[in-house]
Image (cartoon, helix red, strand yellow):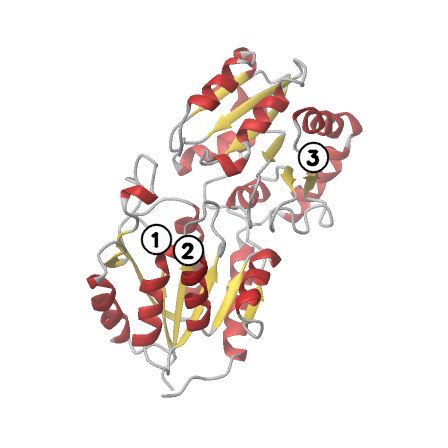
Amino acid sequence: MKPAKWIFFSALAPFRGGIAQFSELLLAALSRKKQLESFTFRKQYPNFLFPGSSQIDAAAHDTHRRIVSTFRPWTYFSAAWRLRRENAAVFVTSYWMSFFSPMMCIWAKLLGKSTLKIAIVHNLKPHESRFFDLLFNRWFVLNYDAFVVLSAAVAADIRAIRPTANVLQLSHPPYAQFGPLQERQSAQLELGLDPQKKTLLFFGLIRSYKGLLPLLEAFRFLDTRFQLLVVGEFYEETAPYEAAFAALDASRVLRVHRYVNDSEIPRYFAATDLVLLPYISATQSGIRAIAQAYQRPVLCSAVGGLSEGLEESQEGFVATDLTPNALAEQIASLFESGRLDAVNNTLRARYAKPEQAWDQFADAFIAFTECLPSKKD
């Protein structure tokens, strides 16, 4: 019997960013178990939805068929017919922005009733809301057969629209694809950091909802035992951040405000004692997944699914108060109490082979798919 074909559409190389990285790793794991064809965008975002320097990773290999431009609606139909010609049993896509809903709903209609349509939903409610979000999200949820999510918060968002939706919640696997972890002191010396100081890391795109401004305020309350590493490209007006940085002791702050290549990532995490995610809103985070792979504890705010299971799994800590003085006090107490040592031991034992988690994720994904009602024309 011929094996059932799957087709997979998402942001993939040469596009950059967390969704593309997640999708590449999941695609590789699924491809080891299923006959699968992959597709991605020709153009992913119009410029008004992408404030960064580039959507493309120049170092990435362009190996996937590029079939659609999101801001050219006529390509939705040509892409749908291209996908339909695959005659696939299962269509898998990624969803993280309501702007994609019309395109993906057209595909759901044109792919035919015999194709099972499954969406990996990274976010349903956007960080920056727009007038069409509620309508487009509802349309999307009602047109797909099943959903895989990475947090209970997103599962609840889907079921608020469709209470009987088929939803599988899985944990975000660790990102171990960037290379081996360096030794801490050598990484700090390469970066020009002081190996004697306690190093805090804020990593990722700089946007208001990620809470860098409150973190910079909190750092003013930390003494000279601490140094701060801020690595990320600005995605918004820089003036408020520049003013906040100017109020700090520059000798204790290292700033890297650009897109960081994959090969550089292990160095930043190796140099770090504690990864900070003081987000004001979130569903889940790829930064936490990188920290897991590189066995670094995190301090996360209690929003969305960002901190789900964190303290229960002994992989990090939850910040319940993001006011500057309270956040600074919690950071200092983590180092003084010895609680970081216990978390470091847990992480070293649990993530000695982080790459195995992607195969486990794919196995659970496939098992979920096979339990869903079959589709017939």
- Report whether 278 appears left or right of 339: left
Do residues under tags 2 and 1 come within 8 Å of each other at their CB atoms?
yes
Q: Which three-letter amino acid code belongs to the residue tagged 1?
A: Leu
- Report whether 149 appears left or right of 259: right
- SS of the residue at dot 1? loop
| Gap in angstroms between the C-alphas marked 1 and 3 | 37 Å
Q: Which three-letter amino acid code belongs to the residue tagged 3?
A: Asp
Considering depth in this image, is 363 or 80 the residue closer to the camera? 80
Return the residue at label 2: 23
- SS of the residue at dot 2? helix
- Look at the image and tell me in which quarter the N terminus lies: bottom left
Residue 89, numbered label: none
Return the residue at label 3: 321
Q: Position of residue 72 (x, y in %)?
A: 21, 56
Question: Which quadrant of the view contains residue 137?
Answer: bottom left
The residue depicted at 53 percent of the width and 24 percent of the height is 229
Residue 12, numbered label: 1
Considering depth in this image, is 253 or 73 the residue closer to the camera? 73
